Image (cartoon, helix red, strand yellow):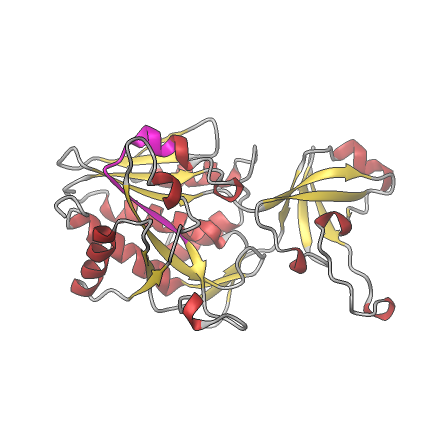
Amino acid sequence: MNIKETLFALSSADGVGNLREASDLAYDLLKEYCKTEKSDTLTVIGYLKGESDYTLMLDAHIDQIAMIVTDIDDNGFLTVAKSGGIDIRALPSRRVTVHGKEKVAAVFCATPPHLSSGEKEYTDIADIKLDTALGAKAKEIISIGDYVTFSADPCELLGTRVSGRSFDDRAAVACLIEVAKRLKDKKLPLNVAFVLSDGEELGMRGIRPAAFKVDPNEAIAIDVSFGDGIGISEDECGKLGEGGMIGISPALDRKISQKLIKTAKDNNIPYQTEVMGERTGTNADMIAVSRQGVRTCTLSIPLRNMHTEVETLDIKDLDSVCELLCAYILSGGAMND
């Protein structure tokens, strides 16, 4: 598969809590290129052996935002809670899948415009009910605690733009699988650990044990960041199609940032910078304080409509991220910096 096909396959699978579709798919894809292992959670770790004892860890989280059933009424309507950063504004009239004893298609209820003043704005997800059309039978198939995920299929837009659900962070997972594919037969100056981590959307809980286990010398967290769009300041986002966003922050290792920038310039790889004044809000924050501390940086993919079912990105940015990571690894990373 090419990287777009990998992204679409990963986007179409579910991965939250005990739903292992995305994790199992990522494992099957990654194991073709390197030694790979599963964990009791959704986390998958792959290893490529290099010629030194120095280890670079690349992280991308495999989990996704979702919802969880908290109540089922006698008419088959469900109440849900958020599992991760769900945008409540985008929920009315959306199609979802309820993962009960079998998968159940459902829709979030929406008041017809004829009966609405247009002034209501939901502030609590519990106020937006899910219609399963099952009536009283709903309680036979669905249980409290079952997960609910968006149902949108990924699609191609014009040019190299694509849209779909869970591109945060399956886009980065697709990049790491592609990097492993490109490097599998190369002589590497360092060891590379590919961590597809669980639980980022629930407080970055999955990367902590993974980073402890790998015990890397340095790490790069590959995630998505805000892409340019309507109502977003240019100072707060990257531009789609202009390359990955190299993180610069007091919380990140400046020498890694500089080495990534130099590598991009030396190899004519498109890139952007993402300057942050404090923490990054990514797994990098947790990796940096693992064990005795780890030199860490971020490399992000510009993404529009984050945390919705129509997240949008440019495939050219995935290619640029893959090229940059491969060139960085082959140059020895920050091993000598």
**Where does the image place residue 138, in percent across and percent down from the top left?**
80, 38
Find out whether residue 11 is within the magenta segment.
no
Residue 160 visible within the image: no
Q: Is residue 77 left or right of residue 204?
A: right
Report the residue at 58% width, 57% height from top. 308
Residue 218 visible within the image: yes
Report the residue at 80% width, 34% height from top. 139
191 and 335: which is toward the camera = 335
**Where does the image place residue 193, in percent across and percent down from the top left?**
29, 38
Report the residue at 78% width, 63% height from top. 120
**Where does the image place residue 59, in percent across and percent down from the top left?**
36, 43
Looking at the image, is 302 positioned above or below residue 220? below
* Magenta residue span: 210-223
Looking at the image, is 130 positioned above or below residue 203? below
Count the marks: how many?
A: 0
Farthest residue to the top: give it: 40
Q: Is residue 30 left or right of residue 17?
A: left
4 and 136: which is toward the camera = 136
Report the residue at 56% width, 32% height from top. 18
Res 94 quadrant in image? bottom right
**Where does the image place residue 170, in percent across and percent down from the top left?**
45, 49
Find out whether residue 211 is within the magenta segment.
yes
Q: Is residue 206 left or right of residue 248?
A: right
